[in-house]
Amino acid sequence: MIDIKQVRADFPILNQQVNGEKLVYFDNAATSQTPLPVLNTICQYYLKENANVHRGVHTLAERATEHYERVRQQVADFIHAASSNEIIFTRSTTESLNDIARGLGDNILQPGDEIVISIMEHHSNLVPWQELAARTGAKLKYIELDNHQELDLNSATEQITPKTKIVAVTAASNVLGTINPIKQIVQLAHHAHAWVVVDAAQYVGHHVVDVQDWDADFVAFSGHKMLGPTGIGVLYGKQDLLNIMHPVQFGGEMIEDVTRQRTTFKKSPLGFEAGTPNISGAVGLGAAIDYLNKVGIKNIEKREQSLANYLLPHLQKIDHLTLYGPQDHHTGVFAFNLDGLHPHDVATGLDLEGVAVRAGHHCAQPLMHTLGVTATARASLAFYNTKEECDQFIQSLVAVKEFFSNGLG
Amino acid sequence: MGLANLSFLYKTLVLEHAKSPHHYEANLPTNGHQVTLHNPTCGDTINVSLQIKDGYLNDLCFNGSGCTISQASASMMTDTLDGKSADDAQKLIQGFLNLCMGKPISDELKQGLRDAAVMGTVAEFPARIKCATLAWHAVQDILNQQK
């Protein structure tokens, strides 16, 4: 059980007024809020340990390095990786995915090979593959949605062929409120001898991640969507694949030996972390993992599902509201539109009511096109949200809708 | 009550323009100067077309999809700039952009902007400034290409 009062006390940002109204933060799919223990850990790091990692022999350098590497192990444990050598710190999910496309894709793809992604991908798991296809002459193909606006496994079966070399899919949609059958997709892909890249940005922190159970070859996610700071991301890769992946950034820290004309590189993970890394970001990520473990991922999953189950019928009851994704179940992500109203206008109206939602294409323009819209509004929940906030959101949404439909009044 | 502020941004005049935009053409003439601009935050697109004859802007029209603010502002823009000289249009566009950024502009410019002068309230809603200025930037782009 989650002590919601205690949890809310850990997130002082939630306890404020916005535009004269009580803040309801429903933009968690864009970024999660950061609890005090994470902020304090970052602060303590700068107060007591700050130094560059893997360079100095002095005591502070030792402390910083030990802490940085301790977090790497924490991340490995958190996602059930076989070894911390399989955990590379990056700037973001986007950087992790670009690293794979550049560092592996450029070296293995031949003209006529196929990259298969799903139509619901965030641009971060779409544009790098589009660019890779353009560079190598490979073909980019899409797994489509079924009638319920969920990933269509039949389409996956059709699209993944012996020519497919890379399959890249998201574990949870940032628009449709769905979770994808990663294990089945991995089986299809591995059967075709393709590698699988999983975008777990919307999944991690909400559900237990077990990369070995998935049997995923690569997994990417960001710290700031799981209570950590911005600017820190993770790239997980199976050890044997990291051994053949090339670094895409070169310079400090990642080298073994440099001569005038030639350089040899360190092995994973340090060989992929050129330059001084985001040490305080990693330290914050470690504290975020501690916090998530303390509350319990299973508890978080349960609470978020119960909030989502509460909100779903209330949203569906609003006349002239279109909810995207499946209608009978949903994660805490709700993309919707009101007939005749632009989502930007809806979001501004809700903002004046203190309710923070996202409006736009959610970095998923091909999906928007498939859904027949240019943009939607989106409310996304976290475990620190409450039923009262769901009620406030619904009440405000109805008021905004009435304002615009009474229009010229 | 938060929504009271909504009518501060969405004044009746704005809602009217958005509901029945002036000079909205489903098919823009193909013989004019035309430019398409995107609002990358929402994927909205605006297409603006105009003729320039003897240094004067004529037959200003637009189409595209967008929010209330961007549609209303485009409609107001066509009313304001149609028939103006290129120089006057540049001044009015700059005046409008300044107004949306919350900078003071002269009463003369404000009068020249006509209905569009009410869009100045968008300065209080920084996330929406791009919506209000998109159509005006489109005309500015066309005029700058003529230089």
Image: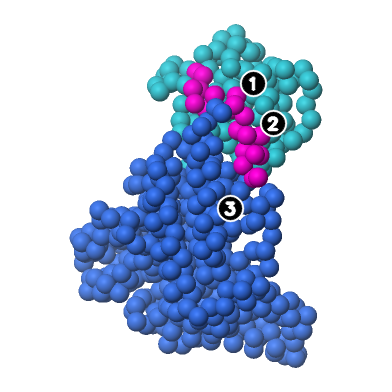
Q: Which chain's residue wears label 2?
A: B
Amino acid type of the residue tagged 3 in the rendering: Val
**Magenta range:** B1-23
Q: To which residue does mark 2 refer?
A: B120
Chain shaded blue: A
> Any mark on residue A93, and which?
none
Q: To which residue does mark 1 refer?
A: B115
A293 falls in the magenta region: no
Give whichever of discs 1 and 2 has the lower sequence position: 1
Q: Residues within 10 Å of mark 1 (few under 14, many from 20)?
A: some
- The span from disc 1 to disc 2 (Cα, nearest Å) is 10 Å
B22 falls in the magenta region: yes
Residue B111 against residue B44 in the figure, above or below: above
- The span from disc 1 to disc 3 (Cα, nearest Å) is 31 Å
Identify the secondary structure beneath mark 3.
strand
Amino acid type of the residue tagged 2 in the rendering: Gly
The colour assigned to chain B within the rendered structure: cyan
Picture quarter with the C terminus of chain A: top right
Q: To which residue does mark 3 refer?
A: A355
